[in-house]
Amino acid sequence: MDSIPSSMYTDIRTFPINMSNRAVEIIKKSVMDKNREYKILRISVEGGGCSGFKYGLNFVRNIDANDILCRYTKEITIAIDINSYLCMKLTTIDFVTTKEGSGFVFQNPSATDSCNGCD
């Protein structure tokens, strides 16, 4: 991780994605898992048509040339490709528990009910 050029990082103050305290807590626990081989959290979004956005969170080893990186906390480094970055402006990621189960929820003001995709 230390070998990643600092020019690839964006400042946390200008990073367009927020995470709730609960989401950060869950992700930190997962990052700190001693059995986890990959430590960079990739956030992605696909779609944007009539079926809506499909979001992804997974841990990766490598970053791509078009990735934007953010050290969100001491333990959490996020990688996101430029297209996902643009689609997810002002998105909040939360972790919720309901009767049906628990998981991450993406509250994205760029997601609309229309077929326009990202603005």
Image (cartoon, rainbow, N blue to C red):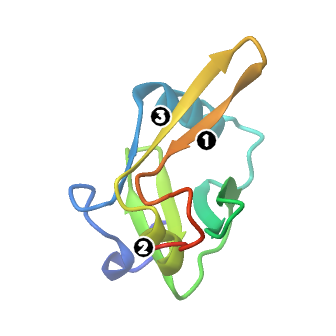
Name the residue furthest top: 99
SS at circle 3: helix
- Residue beneath disc 1: 31
Question: Residue 10 location, x and y as percent?
Answer: 30, 69
Between disc 2 and disc 1, whose residue precedes?
1
Q: Judge the density around disc 2: few (<14), some (14-19), many (≥20) Cα neighbours within 10 Å.
A: some
Q: Judge the density around disc 1: few (<14), some (14-19), many (≥20) Cα neighbours within 10 Å.
A: many
Residue at screen point 60% across, 70% down: 115
Question: Residue 99 location, x and y as percent?
Answer: 74, 11
Residue at screen point 61% across, 41% down: 31
Give the side of residue 83 with respect to residue 31, left or right: left
Residue at screen point 74% across, 45% down: 36
Observer-side mark, 1 or 3, equals 3
Give the side of residue 39 with respect to residue 79, left or right: right
Observer-side mark, 2 or 3, equals 2
Question: Residue 12 location, x and y as percent?
Answer: 27, 56
SS at circle 2: helix
Residue at screen point 43% across, 60% down: 110
Label 2 and label 3: CA atoms lie apart by: 22 Å
The answer to whether 69 is drawn above or below residue 105 in the figure is below
- Residue beneath disc 3: 24
Label 1 and label 3: CA atoms lie apart by: 10 Å
Q: Judge the density around disc 3: few (<14), some (14-19), many (≥20) Cα neighbours within 10 Å.
A: some
- Residue beneath disc 2: 86
Q: Are marks 2 and 3 in contact (CB under 8 Å)?
A: no
The answer to whether 19 is drawn above or below residue 80 in the figure is above
Observer-side mark, 2 or 1, equals 2
The three-letter amino acid code for the residue at tag 3 is Val
The three-letter amino acid code for the residue at tag 2 is Leu
SS at circle 1: helix
The three-letter amino acid code for the residue at tag 1 is Val
